Amino acid sequence: MSACHQVLDRLLFRLSTYLLPLLMLGLSALALVAWPSHYPSLQGQALSFQVVEDLRGNWTPPDALKALAEVNPPAVAHRDTQLSTRPFWLRLDVAEHDSAIPQSVEFSSRHATEITCWDAQNLTELGHADRGTDTGPLSLLKAGFALALPVDRAVDSAICRALFVGPARIRAQQWDSPVLLRSTQQFHNYAGLLDGGVMILALFVFLTGLINRNTTYVLFSTWLVVNLRMAALSAGWDYQWLGHLVPVNWLQPSRLITVAVYYVTTITLFRTFFEDELNKVGYQQLMRLAQWTCLPLLMLSATLSYASFLPLIWVSTAFNIIVLVFFLGRILWLTRSRVAMWYAASITITLFASLYEVISAALGIKGLIDSVNSVTAALSSSLMAALAIAAQMKQEHEQRLEIQAELQHTYEAMPIGLFTLDMQGRFMSANPALLQMLGEQVLEPGHNDWYRQFRQGAWTHLHQQLHQQKTVELEVEGLRQDDNARPRRYMVRAALARDKIEGSLQDVTEKSLAIENLRFLAHNDPLTKVLNRRGVEMALDAALSGAREGRPLALAYLDLDRFKLINDLFGHNAGDEVLQQVCTRVNTLLSEPMRLGRVGGDEFVIVMPDTRVKLARLICQGVVATIGGTPYRVGERAFHVRGSVGLIEVGPGTSIKDAVATADRACREAKAGHSDGLVVFEKNARAFLDHEAEMRLVERLSAQADLSGLFVEMQPIMSLRKPRASLNFEVLLRMQDENGNRIPTDRLIAAGENSGRMGVIDRWVLDHTLQWLQTHQASLGATQFVCMNLSGASLNDERFVDDVFEALEQNIEIARHICLEITESVALHDLQNTRRFIDRVRQYGAKVALDDFGAGYTSFSYLKDLPGDLLKIDGSFIVNMNQHPANIAIVEAIVNLAQNLGMKTIAEWAEDAETVQTLAEIGVDYVQGFVVARPQAPAAILGVRSSADFIPAEGEMATVLDALEKLGTTPDLFLGTSVDQVH
């Protein structure tokens, strides 16, 4: 029974789909060919007439008859108005006819706007009509007007006055009135046929465009309607729209606008329809030129008169016909597109009809091609365009089928798993790649649940995310398939599609492990596996956030003592093994959330959040003991390593940089041998506060362009040869803060070096000193030299060195008083550059002193390569030297060496009279220290004649001073020059 039903279904389907359409087509062809027409072809009798143009426009019927008699124009069958809007008078004779049959004369021009007729014999008015009204037997008919001749009397001839707008052709036909009535019905039948057919087609295309969201179809439906109106304009029934009369005052403007709109839509449709093809055939500028003519024509159609606008549209139409035909030819030649062929046929018909209208209107040769039927042209072009649309729809359908086949192939061949889930988390479909990943049973009922494939909570997370956002991307972990196997990881990308979930699944196990490894390496040291510098910063930043909330935080800085020896003696492999063992030992003492990080070769940081300093101290003591308690075995060797730890209590608001720097400072103090390898800075400890003050000073020096707060003091240097004969001194840098409090000099220098501003500071001291000496030169007659220190950072700054030379050259008269002090360590850092600097400075007459001699490398050999003028003996040998005979011997050796090299000596830090007396006996040339005077304000220097004037008149030092004066037989000379020569 079921088979019978299937056969019946197929039979009815084929009957309705194939047989009946074929029968309808055959029957229609038979009707067109063999059956008689319900509207046979009817034709009136053409009348010849005389016509004359009323150039003044004020003739009366007698005036017209007189003009016709005078001019006596030949009788013609038609007359073109040549766009004239002046009245035309025509005289016509009625043809012979059966008096029993009513007669009518038709004036068929669609451009006629008004007509009035009189009996030519007695000038009796026969009727008047315009596009809005009619009187008597003269009325609107078809595209023009018709005059029903009187039946009660004979009218042999008539004279008519007619007005026209546009390219009108005057013609007159005499009809039997019943035949004219049938012809009128035939006319309206054609109009209705065209209206109905094209409007239904346009509506179909419009709805198709809306449903498929295809703007090309919507544009084509618009073009069909405009094409219909153009056909109505050509056929002469554009005075109605869907059976309703167009207002008379709208008729003429609408004709111009219709022509312009048809022009615009034709070009736009062509550009849209063949957009891809036009990009291939080239000549884009030609198409753009055609498009740029559209908007001006559209605006002019609403403003210009009929006579002014028509020449423009004729020229534009002729140009664009050539352009479109050119592009159509190239498209057909290059693409061989069937769609293009149908459309070419449609537009060829349309363009031919348009060209026909242009030529007939412009040249008046309408009679040559009367066989062209505007209704037929409109129907044919619309039919061809519909076939083009159908061909395109077929082409798009075939393309969709191809795309679907490709998508299906891609779906099956895709290496990424694709799936569809219902809203309960059950697999509805899966491609082969997903089946290979999860197993064939994933689509079987009872095994197709999401939770059977992935870790618990994965479905809930996915479901919640999809309700919060349109698309979701998350990583899930599969269930362990084997106890020894690592669970696989998958990247899920999913989106809601109505009541289903569409998504993809990609195995990213290896990628995930690689990312984890990269993430570990980004924050951890690859050798020791503890945090690296970046990881330390992140951990410390998180801990500082807790500190801002009032939670305790401790930070330890660990440095391994003499670890470099292991690398140097036994190689880096041994050193690396020791580092790994050190980290292992330290980590055994730490608990969560404490973290150990490596910030240097043998330097580590321990971040201890939520740890008070007392507990942190115990932990750090254990770290020091654990590191140095037992040796480290690497192969057959054993190494002993000690560690020094600086521990600080970090307060709220401390930056990462300041915290690490303070802990590092504490570690350096521990490394110096204090407190059994551990130094602790609590929040309010003096050292902690000093370091914070230094950091603030660094920030201040780095931020401000000027050096506000800097000033200098001057400490006298007394000659031991003739104490009262010279006034020498050293310029000392000082600074005060915003409140006027003095900043310790060592803190200022450290901050200047850390901020990179030491060169600027030294330049300020030099400029200030030179300016002060220039100002007070007359008061400094006894001054032989003025010492000032240069930091190592400044001497390594080429720009600063050039500034020194420039300053000395600009102050050449004062430069001979300047004595620049260079420390022994800086001099030996780059001996050749130091030698060049000293030579250049001495060329300007300035002097050079080697400062802190004996405190650094204690190497005498370099003195022969540095032509210094003064040698300043380090104060550590001078303080209490009488209690240390070894210091006396060292100082005496330095003095003898300096004398042999032609250098003068200055002893620093002299604090008592006995030391001064011993220095004089040894042969030291100058002495500097509190025993002579503390640092003085510059004004105090100007108030004395010599450095000895600062010594009180009473006391032990005064006695020594008197003794020096009595024994001072050697002239107090500087490098062999007298005081007079110096000044």
Image (cartoon, rainbow, N blue to C red):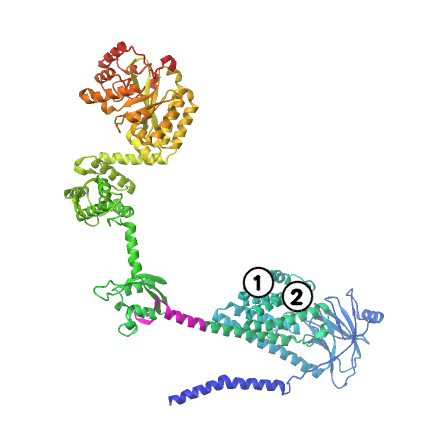
Report which residue position mark 2 lands on.
Answer: 318
Q: Which residues are magenta?
A: 401-430
Res. 383 visible in picture: yes
What residue type is disc 2 on?
Ala
Report which residue position mark 1 lands on.
Answer: 282
Q: Which of the marked residues, 1 or 2, is nearer the chain's N terminus?
A: 1
Q: Is residue 913 left or right of residue 819?
A: left
State the CA–CA distance, disc 1 to disc 2: 21 Å
What residue type is disc 1 on?
Gly
Residue 792 horizontal/vertical position (percent): 33, 31
Please state, as top left, top right, bottom left or bottom right, where the N terminus lies in the image: bottom left
Q: Nearer the viewer, residue 105 or 660?
A: 660
Residue that appears at 60% across and 71% down: 347
Q: Nearer the viewer, residue 95 or 116?
A: 95
Q: For the residue carrying disc 1, how many other residues have a C-alpha within 10 Å: few (<14), some (14-19), or many (20+)?
A: few
The local secondary structure at tag 2 comes to helix
